Image (spheres, rainbow, N blue to C red):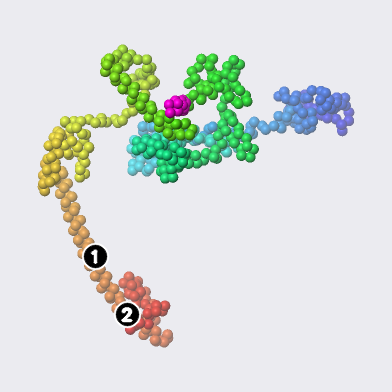
Amino acid sequence: MESGNMETIASNPPGGSNGLEEPKKMTREDWRKKKELEEQRKLGNAPAEVDEEGKDINPHIPQYISSVPWYIDPSKRPTLKHQRPQPEKQQEFTAQGEWYKRGVKENSVATKYRKGACENCGALTHKKKDCLERPRKVGAKFTGTNIAPDEHMQPQLMFDYDGKRDRWNGYNPEEHMKIVEEYAKVDLAKRTLKAQKLQEELASGKLTEQVSSPRHQWGEEEPNSQMERDHNSEDEDEDKYADDIDMPGQNFDSKRRITVRNLRIREDIAKYLRNLDPNSAYYDPKTRAMRENPYANAGKNPDEVSYAGDNFVRYTGDTISMAQTQLFAWEAYEKGSEVHLQADPTKLELLYKSFKVKKEDFKEQQKESILEKYGGQEHLDAPPPELLLAQTEDYVEYSRHGTVIKGQEKAVARSKYEEDVMINNHTCIWGSYWKEGRWGYKCCYSFVKYSYCTGEAGKELANANEELPGGESNEEEYMTVPKTLVEMHQEKQREEKKKKKKKHKKNTSSDSEGEDRKKQEKLKKALNAEEARLLHVKEIMQLDERKRPYNSMYESREITEEEMEAYQMKRQRPDDPMASFLGQ
């Protein structure tokens, strides 16, 4: 055997260093067979080698990559497992959808202080220096009451690349319902205002005058119509952004001039997938229309299913009222009234409304005439059969405590206190009358609670007391209750405090006047001293420097406020234009 062209394999006899056997040389024949097998595998004539997991190994992968080194595990077959990411080194990330918990734990409020908890609020999840509650005068550690609930221990979240960039992670979809409800309320308020405005115009007769005007009949517009301007402004507000919106049902491209009809939103179920029975409703693929109900043979109510055919949609909403208006227009035109749904819709709507009112009045008159002639009003005014038979078909489900669970709407509780309770012959409640900072009864002008009502006599007496000069004082004396000794003692203390305050104010005013006088005297003295100092400085400056006394230009004592003010008043400023006149 030649050592240069031989490859080694591992066998496992006993012995060797570290329990491993040294590699054994291959024969020339084994080497040649191995090379032929590799060539056949590369050409695809022989099946690929399988690793320990049962996966095929690409024959073009070099041997030094696919084979396991003999010093690691000589018994292992060729594999690529060691080239793949190892599970123990893989980083574990938090699953999407997990987020930090908000608020505090429910149903876990402690009743006494626990060791190691916050000394301020008593929560066990933080210390006193991290407490966000207002600092109490006496902490929960010493009172043992009003223990705050524990917060959630926040998890350590570790997201991957997508989780870190997920904007909606932790978002509560119920928050969006508040925005939807707010917009719905605004829309409802706009509709009610618009309807109220139209009713006011109909009641005032402006709308009928505009309809009957000759300009409106000939198709001309009123130039000064305030109503029309208001409606136009409202339409502009509603259709302000209508041009920028592409509706899913009709998308128009201005460049290609193509209109795409009946586009289906991708999340909706296709019409032909509603019912796969070939004998069910016909689906036209060209127009994407299914006119009949696909659930007709299934025995389902059309009101309960999400889609009941295109014809069902056409006969819902205002379609029926529109058809009735059109029918009324045709009948009115046959009888001589020149009205048209498209040409004059406002006039037609007003005529139709007046026709319905007259029709209802005619029915009522006819009903009254029949009842007057034949009688039978007592049968129409009979109570409902539910009261007569003491049974009904309405399903109501009650809980074990007697509260309604399902089947009947709960009555809205107005208040936990009794309302509109009249006592002592009063016709108004306490608090219905207010005057000069006092509450009373409006029915008798009485300010005494739980008093008996005197009616109009009480009102007259109250008005008479107002006209008298001493009426208020007499009523107050009558209303006053005899004071106790404690209240009399407290009043005396208040009066003494008021007297002391007045004396203190007088003393402070006299003290302030005396201080002002003293300041003026001190300032005069300081001015005289400043003049003397200036003369002394002038004399010293005229002397020779060698003849001046020691420390003649230096003074060690502290300067007072008066002296500083006198210096500011007396010092000369060379930039002052009036400086030359100061000495005169």
Question: Which sits in the foreground, 565 or 164?
Answer: 164
Q: Relative to 452, is 223 above or below?
A: below
Question: Which sits in the foreground, 297 or 85?
Answer: 297
Mark 2: which amino acid?
A: Glu
Q: Mark 1 sits on what residue?
A: 512
The quarter of the picture where residue 366 lies is top left
Q: Mark 2 sits on what residue?
A: 531
In the current view of this chain or complex, which residue is farthest to the top?
A: 389
The C terminus appears in which quarter of the rendering? bottom left
262 left or right of 5 in image: left
Asked if labels 1 and 2 touch by Cβ distance under 8 angstroms, the answer is no
Question: Which sits in the foreground, 416 or 285?
Answer: 285
For the question of whether residue 260 can be seen, the reply is yes
Does 90 lie within the magenta span?
no
The N terminus appears in which quarter of the rendering? top right
Residue in the image at 37% along x and 29% along y? 354
Residue in the image at 35% along x and 42% along y? 136
